[in-house]
Amino acid sequence: RVPIWLDCDPGHDDAFAILLAAYHPGIQLLGISTIFGNAPLDAAVAINSKTTWNATSILTAIGKPNIPVYAGAPNALIRPPLVPPTDIHGETGIDGTDLLPRPLTPANTSVSAVDAIAAAIIRTEPNTAWIVATGALTNVASLFRAHPELASHMKGVSLMGGAIGGKFTGAIMGKVGNVERMGNWTQFAEFNILVDPEAADEIFQNPVLKGKTTMIPLDVTHLVLATQEVQGMLLFGRSSDGAAAWAGASQWTRAESEGEKREIKGKTKLRTMLVELLTFFAKTYTDVFGITEGPPLHDPLAVAAVLTGTEWEIPFFDSTSSGGKERYDVHVNTVGTHEEARAGAETGRTVPTLMPEGQEGTRIPRGLDIEMFWQVIEDCLERADEV
Ligand code: BDR
Ligand code: CA
């Protein structure tokens, strides 16, 4: 199994990253660290802080309360925190359901998150372990500052963050005025990168990590929308004859159109909770971005990407039309404050340069087998339902 450490800021989509990491048979989840982002993380009350509480609560909800959780950084490396995105994730960072349980196991405070990650990774076989980051990269940058030797020991870093723009995948992010939008937090910047652009640039420019970093930008995540059909399957599961069809979809769609959504109870409490989260996330994506097909489920894709090259591979397409593998030198624009970014500066923009064929660089896939991805999420839910 592929050993991974998950660094996250739950987060509606982070919750699905946790589910996938905890239940995929090809993954060994070593532990979780939290970062401020979708909601604050106040170091003084780390155990009850929002993103940390959310992570421990999600683990309890999915029946994995013993996976260790460590509270990481409450601030960016050098900037003041970005205002939390309450219009996307709500006040708690994971609004939309009353079914999140009180955590059975609190976060571990005996050592810092950075030291916990280092200790877990160094125990893995060389060239096997991944760090998956689904929030700002502050903890990950701090890890490699404190333990630079880990970069050569591990297999790689897979991160959800950044935006490429143009016709990179064909996903449409919308417009700012008449200009094409590439970021979600500003016209140019994706949220996780904008929160701590200096940390992100340190990861992309780390000479040892250059050949082993995978970036999952918005251009890819906006191809993976949790549509009504997907939500139907996640709510009701596969049909009892075992068919891989989206069994619940028609039932869900009918109930939706009849306005019965609130009364609908999924096959299990966990499924109901997760679809309540998706329903909230869908509404905020409609309200803020005008995306009506369903919310993009960004974060689990960074987990899925670590399966590349294993028997469990979910194919990610990262080849040019000529068949070569694209690799990039990625720089992050660190000029300007968050306020200037809001006013139009390119702060937090990820700028990729295609490397000559055969040279090392960051992998940025252009797509994936989306149907298979949802089937794998459903497989994980079926496993979680049995616990
Ligand atoms: C990223 O920002 C957060 O809101 C999500 O959890 C995801 O990690 C998308 O830009
Ligand atoms: Ca996240």
Image (spheres, rainbow, N blue to C red):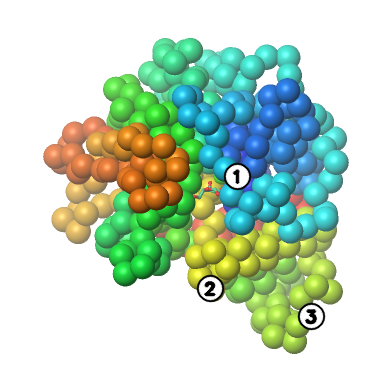
The residue labelled by disc 3 is 260
- Residue neighbourhood size for the residue with mark 3, other residues' Cα within 10 Å, grouped as few (<14), some (14–19), many (≥20): few
Q: Determine whether 177 is above or below 185 in the image.
A: below
Image quadrant where residue 67 sits: top right
Residues under labels 3 and 1: Cα distance? 32 Å
Image quadrant where residue 84 sits: top right
| Foreground disc of the pair 1, 2 | 1
Residues under labels 3 and 2: Cα distance? 19 Å
Residue 293 marker: 2
Residue 217 visible in this rendered orientation of the protein: no
Helix, strand or loop at mark 1: loop
Residue drawn at the location 39% of the way across and 50% of the way down? 343
Q: Is residue 370 left or right of residue 64?
A: left
User: Mark 1 or mark 2: which comes first in sequence?
Assistant: 1
The residue labelled by disc 1 is 84
On whether ligand 1 comes within 8 Å of the CB at mark 3, the answer is no
Residue drawn at the location 29% of the way across and 22% of the way down? 207
User: Mark 3 or mark 2: which comes first in sequence?
Assistant: 3
Q: Determine whether 294 is above or below 120 in the image.
A: below
Residue drawn at the location 54% of the way across and 20% of the way down? 121
Amino acid type for the residue under numbered disc 1 = Pro
Image quadrant where residue 346 sits: top left
Residue drawn at the location 77% of the way across and 62% of the way down? 272
Q: Position of residue 17 (x, y in %)?
A: 59, 46
Amino acid type for the residue under numbered disc 2 = Glu
Q: Is residue 366 left or right of residue 75?
A: left
Please name whichever residue, 79 or 371, is drawn nearer the observer in this view of the structure: 79
Helix, strand or loop at mark 3: loop
